Image (spheres, coloured by chain):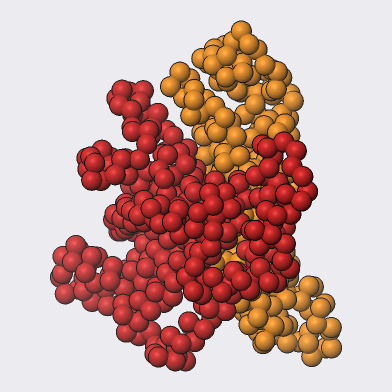
Amino acid sequence: MKTYIAQRLAIAVLTLLGMSLVIFTLLRLAPGDIVDILFSTAGYVSPSEKQAIMQELGMDRPYWVQYLEWLKQIVTGDLGKSYRYDLPAWQIIRPLLPVTIELAALSMVVAVLLGVPTGVISAVRQDSTLDYVLRVISLAGLSMPAFWLGMVIILTLVTWLQWIPPLTYVPPTEDFKLHAVQFALPALAVGYRSSALIMRITRSSLLEVLREDYIRTAWAKGQSGRIVVWRHALKNAMLPVVTVIGIEFAFLIGGLVVTETVFNLPGVARFLVQAILWRDYPIVQNLVMFIAIVVILSNLLVDMLYGVLDPRVRYGS
Amino acid sequence: MAVRSAELAAPAAAPSRPGAWTVLARFVRKKPLGAAGGVLMLVMVLTAVFAELLQTHDPIATDAAYTLGRPTAEHWFGTDHLGRDIYSRIVHCARVSLIVGVASTLLGSVLGGLVGLLSGYIGGKTDLVTQRVLDILQGLPLLVLALVMVAALGPAIHNVVIAISIPIIPRAARVIRSSVLSIREMQYVEAARALGVRHLRIAFRHILPNTVGPFIVLCTAQLGSAVLVEATLSFLGLGVPEPYPSWGRMLSVSAAEYAQKAPHLVLVPGVAISLAVFGANLMGDALRDVLDPRLRGA
């Protein structure tokens, strides 16, 4: 087990290193850099002035020096400085984190609460009308852009209920009820979409387990349907579901990018889009790297959970 | 073993292959949802091809006298904030979305498929290294990777295609690799090797054709998400540039400001995106059931 974890960690570090190289290269490919953008509104700027700014931002150094410098920053937890705001990146990102974490967690809760029960019902009633309806509803969730769903939710509230959601972020300390509503709506939009995959995997995995011998034994013993499904079958069917929830987490971050924009929530994901538009390298670099770390760690965590959930899984071979 | 008399009576008659129509009819009967998806996709393709014939107005002609118009007999889906006919714009967007969706799906799937084929066939260290490199590409959410790519490459329609196709590569490579791994061990491949057939020929002539099933399934499944990513990128202002009309951009320009006065500005493009993706997803599900029995019911 220990060697397995060490191995997995080593691979994770290598993957992240590769990813840092990809991100760094991609952002250097971009046409137009921050200096051009900073000066685009200023009209004519003398080349020497431009040079001075480049030097100050460390952009005149060779790429490999910039890259190594960045790696050193990541390792030491220093997130660098935002070109645009002239502030330490961490100072900008930190207040945005709770918003995104809260939204991600809520969306995940919605996704699991919607996905698992519907998946179970669909599997138990395989090929019934209810099964078809639930499958179509879940596939529809996969087909709708989360941001559009958000817009429709807002539109419905405004048009039919005459209720206008707050235009700016409301901290929970200020008005908890309004805060809850403000987060529940985007969480519903993102969660519904994410629930689709969870529902599908729950369904197919449960269908497979329900055909196994020990389930037949449970039926034969005369146990009630509810206990057979929820206690005996679901326990074993959850393994692939847990994997998908892990993968889904990465998927969800993608969904947040637009949802935060639509709902005007000052989160990390919305900020990433703005930073990309401004070509604020350090911010984009660090945010994308941060997302990569979260994704890879959550995958690692899921693998570890396997052993806990299923004693048959042995590590190290 | 019981042999039915009919078979004895006509031993020479080779079992005729069912015609295309029979296969189609059987598909419709067995997979009504998949067939519905197929119809949706067919509608989308026809719309894309015959956009000029289907339009009722010039999609970029503005009409200052009739902005934010409600749907009428003249303007079926109403008009936007510049007085442009929404129906005609929707029709033209189908072309852009389909081209971007299909091109990026094909590009990503073919590149990924090649990587998967070679890495699965060669195996060993090459395979191991390739898998790790694919891990790197897969470590980021599709949309985030596409966002960074498109920002790096600049706003142009072919850059959007590239940006969407790159995240598809590792997914395609994984699918093809896993089917190559099982085909590689089959006896006919061993026989080919024993006959001294060159490796590249074995890989491309003997193994590749047998991965067509998973490949088609993969492409249909990815097409839906490619269309979605394109819509999302365009919504954020990083997708298909002007003057091409795009469903995603129709939502970003109009929606926020005029939504209350003209809800159809939000509803129509979103329904169009959802139907197109829904069609691809339904079709993909059904095709997977038919072509890839291992995943049946998943």
Report whether residue B270 is seen.
Answer: yes
Report whether residue B173 is seen.
Answer: no
Question: Is A255 displayed left or right of A105 in the figure?
Answer: right
Q: Position of residue B259 (x, y in %)?
A: 46, 24
Chain painted in orange in the figure:
B
The vertical placement of A275 against B207, above or below, is above
Q: Which image quarter: residue A200?
A: bottom left
Q: Position of residue B133 (x, y in %)?
A: 64, 74
Q: Position of residue B272 (x, y in %)?
A: 55, 34
What residue do we see at 63% from left, 82% from top?
B128
Q: The N terminus of chain A lies in which quarter of the figure?
A: bottom left
Q: Which image quarter: residue A19?
A: bottom right
Q: Count the labels in the image.
A: 0
The vertical placement of B78 against A33, above or below, is above
What residue do we see at 72% from left, 62% from top?
A60
What residue do we see at 51% from left, 75% from top?
A75
Chain A display color: red
The vertical placement of B246 against A126, above or below, is above
Q: Position of residue B223 (x, y in %)?
A: 61, 50
Q: Which is more toward the observer, A203 or A94?
A: A94
What residue do we see at 33% from left, 33% from top?
A166
